[in-house]
Image (cartoon, helix red, strand yellow):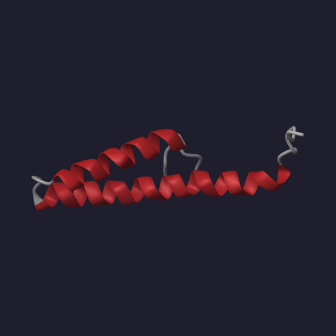
């Protein structure tokens, strides 16, 4: 499976979030060429979309989740 729209992603939320954080660190550090910066920006957009996918799926599942034990 791939990370293409409409398919089940192979990257987990945690992996995508960590890679996105790395992309942001690299962009903030600077020292990149314009082409490198654009490539990282595009990858960051892909990763952000992947994170949104996982979060949206989690939100959809919440109403069906059984209630947990509530502390008294």
Q: What is the x, y in percent for residue 43?
A: 33, 54
Residue at image x 15%, y 59%?
35
Is 66 left or right of 55, judged from the image as shown?
A: right
Does the image show residue 11?
no
Q: What is the x, y in percent for residue 45?
A: 38, 60
Is 67 left or right of 9, judged from the image as shown?
A: right
Q: What is the x, y in percent for residue 59?
A: 70, 56
Compared with 10, 51 (above or below) is below
Picture quadrant of residue 38: bottom left
Is 60 left or right of 69, judged from the image as shown?
A: left
Q: Nearer the viewer, residue 7 or 70?
A: 70
Q: Where, quadrant-wise, is the N terminus in this rendering?
A: top right
Q: What is the x, y in percent for residue 48?
A: 44, 57
Picture quadrant of residue 33: bottom left
Residue at image x 29%, y 59%?
41
Does the image show residue 28?
yes
Residue at image x 53%, y 40%?
12
Farthest residue toward the right?
72
Compared with 10, 27 (above or below) is below
């Amino acid at each position: 499976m791939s990370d293409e729209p409409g398919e089940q992603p192979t990257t987990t939320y945690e992996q995508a979030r960590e890679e996105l954080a790395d992309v942001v660190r690299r962009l903030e550090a600077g020292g990149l060429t314009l082409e490198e910066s654009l490539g990282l920006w595009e990858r960051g957009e892909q990763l952000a979309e992947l994170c949104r996918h996982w979060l949206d799926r989690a939100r959809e599942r919440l109403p069906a989740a059984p209630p947990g034990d509530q502390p008294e």
